[in-house]
Amino acid sequence: MVAPDTLSVWAETDGEIRLFISHRDVHKAAAKELALSLEDYGISAFVAHDTIQPMTTWQHEILKGLQGMEFMLAFITDDFFKSPWTNQEIGYARGNSIPIISLKLENTDPQGFLGSEQALKSDLKNPSSKCVDIYSHITNKLGARKRLDDALIAAFVNSPNFDEARDRFNRMQDVIEELSDDQLHKICIGFKKNDQLYGSIYLGNKNKRLSKFLEKTRPIDEISIEGRNIIIK
């Protein structure tokens, strides 16, 4: 495997999971949409291109992406298995024991090496609807839950405005099942320092969203929020 910090596509992932999305070139816009959405979950996605006669330099970039990936997502459309390039990418992942998740977007089911596992299902109009499922699948397969949860927590405590605080909290709430002592401490410190968190009506109104999230992920603690402070007993 190539060191990811030597590759331009993954030079600044800073702990993010390196995901290679194998797809047909005609669907690159939808694949890119998914890749951008996955960034919010701490997943850095390389979107490979499929062309009839790729330039040698592009072949080299694809190979580097394959060598640096930790996980592959097969973006399965009806024309996916008709391409020698996507088939070779799947074969490369299998040959190097890289986990693969299939995302079925049209009528074609996973074939060949991918046929033994059930695919996630979405559609080309909204492939990002499966981000949470992809996140969960990757964390379970790689044993990387803490690594990805840490990325979501870091994004949350550094929220630059109220809208981002809401969106980042919702992503964190959707996927984090349990907080460690260190993770809880980071949320407490970040909350106290960031007025976009302690001043957020969404987090602190009568629904008590943040309090309920912390109580759910830390059932052994008694937690309350007073002004800027998260109180743990």
Image: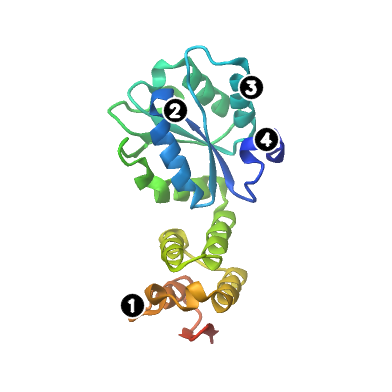
Say whether residue 157 is left or right of residue 10: left
Say whether residue 230 is left or right of residue 206: right
User: In terms of sequence position, does the residue under pointer 4 or pointer 2 come before the other?
Assistant: 4
**Residue at the disc numbered 4:** 7
Residue at 57% of width from left, 46% of height from top?
Answer: 17
- Disc 1 residue crowd, few under 14, some 14–19, many 20+, Cα 10 Å: few
Q: Amino acid at mark 2?
A: His
Numbered circle sitting on residue 60: 3
Helix, strand, or loop for circle 2?
loop
What is the C-alpha distance between the residues marked 2 and 3? 17 Å
User: In terms of sequence position, does the residue under pointer 1 or pointer 4 come before the other?
Assistant: 4
- Disc 4 residue crowd, few under 14, some 14–19, many 20+, Cα 10 Å: some
Residue at 59% of width from left, 21% of height from top?
Answer: 58
What is the C-alpha distance between the residues marked 4 and 2? 20 Å
The percent coordinates of residue 60 (x first, y second) are 64, 22
Residue 102 appears anywhere in the view: no
In the displayed structure, 231 sits above or below 72; it is: below
**Residue at the disc numbered 1:** 207
Residue 180 placement: quadrant: bottom right
User: In terms of sequence position, does the residue under pointer 1 or pointer 2 come before the other?
Assistant: 2
User: In terms of sequence position, does the residue under pointer 2 or pointer 3 come before the other?
Assistant: 2
Q: Amino acid at mark 4?
A: Leu
In depth, the one of 91 and 39 nearer the eye is: 39
What is the C-alpha distance between the residues marked 3 and 1? 52 Å
Residue at the limit of the structure toward the front, as seen here: 161
Q: Amino acid at mark 3?
A: His
Numbered circle sitting on residue 23: 2
The percent coordinates of residue 14 (x first, y second) are 65, 50
User: In terms of sequence position, does the residue under pointer 3 or pointer 1 come before the other?
Assistant: 3
Residue 175 appears anywhere in the view: yes
Q: Amino acid at mark 1?
A: Asn
